[in-house]
Structure formats: structure tokens, C-alpha cells
Image (cartoon, rainbow, N blue to C red):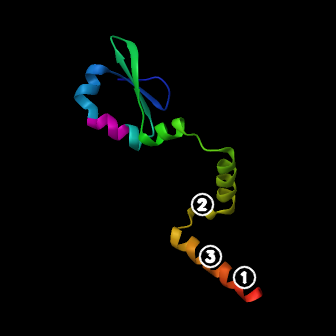
Amino acid sequence: MRREKRATIVVSALNVRTSFGKLLRRIEDEHRSLVIEKRGVPKAVLLSIRDYVRLAAPEPEVLCVIGEESRRNGTDTLTSGQIYRIIKAARVQKLKRG
């Protein structure tokens, strides 16, 4: 097994057969992709489902902008319960004013 780039693992088809479970865990845990070679020739790529979805359906630009703003404001770590309470409080305030 050798590494081409930081995020890519290059491995032989034989090694994939004997270490498939271990390689799946590495792909997911280390956010890497896997290039599978047969007789030294790249034949396939194995990606985590998260990476596949990103490639198949990239985020619209507006979602990227919203995500960046959320990280800057520190709101990217809010739980759904916290978000619900914030929305509920805003609705109560709006009802009091209107």
C-alpha cells in the first residue's frame, strides 16, 4: 500500500480483498479516498458515501455562503433544540409587537 497524495491511498486489488473492512474504516475515519490498482494500473476508486454525495450533488453557492457566515457567527455549533428555542422566542417577540 502506498500513498499518492495526503488524502488518497493507493492499494492493490489483492490487498483490497484481504483488508476490505479495515480499508473501509480508514476511508471513513480519515476522510480519504482509495485508488485500487491491478498489476500497477489504476482500475477503480473507493470513496466514503459523504465524499460521493459531495461529488454527485455539490452544494449550491448560497449554501456555502450561509455556512461560512454561520461559522463566523459561531452559530454552526447550535443544536436543533437550541435553534428551536431561538425561533420560538423570536415568534413570541413578534406576536407581542404585532
Residue 95 placement (x, y as % from top left)? 71, 85
Residue 68 placement (x, y as % from top left)? 67, 52
Between marks 3 and 1 in the image, the one whose residue lies nearer the viewer:
1
Query: Is residue 23 covered in magenta?
Result: yes
Regarding mark 3 in the picture, which secondary structure is present there?
Answer: helix
Q: Which residue is mark 1?
A: 94
Instruction: Determine the residue positioned at 33% across, 41% down.
Output: 25
Q: Mark 2 to mark 3: distance in Å?
A: 14 Å
Instruction: Determine the residue positioned at 56% across, 63% down.
Output: 77
What amino acid is found at the position of numbered circle 2 in the picture?
Answer: Asp
Query: Is residue 79 covered in magenta?
Result: no
Q: Residues within 10 Å of mark 1 (few under 14, many from 20)?
A: few
What amino acid is found at the position of numbered circle 3 in the picture?
Answer: Ile
Regarding mark 2 in the picture, which secondary structure is present there?
Answer: helix
Instruction: Determine the residue positioned at 33% across, 10% down.
Output: 39
**Mark drawn on residue 53:** none
Dominant secondary structure (helix, strand or loop) of the stretch shown in magenta: helix
Q: Which residues are magenta?
A: 21-26
Figure quadrant of residue 27: top left
Figure quadrant of residue 71: bottom right
Q: Which residue is mark 3?
A: 86
Q: Which residue is mark 2?
A: 76
Answer with mark 2 or mark 3, whichever residue precedes in sequence.
2
